Structure formats: structure tokens, C-alpha cells
């Protein structure tokens, strides 16, 4: 997650997903091929104060690191916590589309199909 001053947060999610997928597709550590420099450049270009990133392949953590500083001026690490606020909407969208890709749900499913507490919403 990233802390920023004035860039759209949704772009960060897309960029991090693309970076993670690209690293997993080539089977290399994201630190190879100048990932650190690219991430620092991204933070600077979009006026982000700092961020943390992780790459996961087949359920295995390949890479996790923090970059820059948080709002209190402390160095960001892979374990730094961030308030995600409205970013949760973007993350939910990505998670739903992943379930669609896996064939576990469709975009036409009714809510009550998966959330039994809402069966009364036929």
C-alpha cells in the first residue's frame, strides 16, 4: 500500500498488480531488472511519500520491501501498516475479478447465492 499526497489510489493498485504479475510471469525476483529503481521513480513521479510492496507466486512470498517514509517520517518496511480507506473498493474489485477468472463466481450471480444471510433478497 502507498501513502500519497495527490495521485489517484486506484492507479497504485493497478501498478502493483501489474508489477507483481510481471515478476511472477518471468519467474524472477522483482528486485532483478531494476525493480527497486522503478518503484522509487514511481513514488517520486506521483508524489507518494512511501509504500510497501510484495510479490507472491503460487502462494509463496518472493519479495517484500518498504520504500520511502510514512507520514510520521519513519522508514517504511514490508511490515508497515497503512490506512487503506477507499482503496478497499479497488481491492474488492480485484478480488471479485480473480474469483471470476477462477470460475468460482460469475458477474451475473445473485448476492444470495454466495451470502446465505441475504436469501430473502430474491
Image (spheres, grey):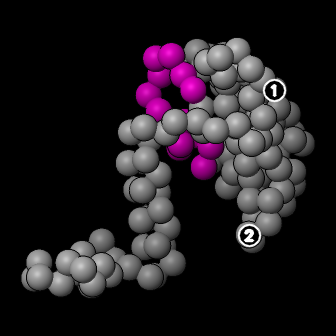
Residue 57 appears left or right of 119? right
- Residue 17 in the image: above or below residue 39: below
User: Does the segment drawn in magenta span residue 41?
Assistant: no
Secondary structure, magenta segment, majority class: helix
- Residue 106 in the image: above or below residue 36: below
Q: Which residue is mark 1?
A: 37
Q: Which residue is mark 2?
A: 59
Determine the secondary structure under disc 1. helix
Instruction: Tell me the quarter of the picture where residue 26 sits.
Output: bottom right
Mark with earlier residue (1, 2): 1
**Residue at horizontal 80%, vertical 66%?**
60
Image mark for residue 91: none
Q: 41 or 65: which is nearer to us?
A: 65
Residue 82 appears left or right of 56? left
Q: Which numbered mark, 1 or 2, is in the foreground of this view?
A: 2
On the rendered image, what quadrant is the C terminus found in? Answer: bottom left
Spatial CA span between label 1 and label 2: 26 Å
On the rendered image, what quadrant is the N terminus found in? Answer: top right
Where residue 88 appears, x then y in whole percent?
43, 47
**Residue at horizontal 43%, vertical 64%?**
97
Q: Which residues are magenta?
A: 3-17
Residue 109 makes an appearance in the image? no
Residue 107 appears left or right of 67? left
Residue 102 appears left or right of 116? right
- Residue 32 in the image: above or below residue 122: above
Q: Alpha-carbon neighbours of circle 2 within 10 Å: few (<14), some, or many (≥20)?
A: few
Residue 72 makes an appearance in the image? yes
Amino acid at each position: 500500500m502507498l501513502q500519497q499526497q495527490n495521485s489517484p489510489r486506484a492507479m497504485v493498485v493497478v501498478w502493483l498488480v501489474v508489477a507483481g504479475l510481471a515478476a511472477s510471469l518471468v519467474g524472477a525476483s522483482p528486485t532483478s531488472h531494476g525493480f527497486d529503481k522503478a518503484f522509487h521513480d514511481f513514488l517520486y513521479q506521483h508524489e507518494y511519500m512511501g509504500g510497501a510492496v510484495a510479490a507472491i507466486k503460487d502462494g509463496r512470498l518472493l519479495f517484500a520491501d518498504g520504500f520511502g517514509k510514512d507520514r510520521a517520517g519513519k522508514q517504511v518496511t514490508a511490515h508497515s501498516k497503512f490506512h487503506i480507506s477507499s482503496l478497499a473498493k479497488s481491492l474488492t474489485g480485484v478480488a471479485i475479478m480473480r474469483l471470476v477468472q477462477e470460475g468460482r463466481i460469475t458477474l451475473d450471480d445473485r448476492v444470495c447465492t454466495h451470502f446465505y444471510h441475504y436469501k430473502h433478497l430474491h
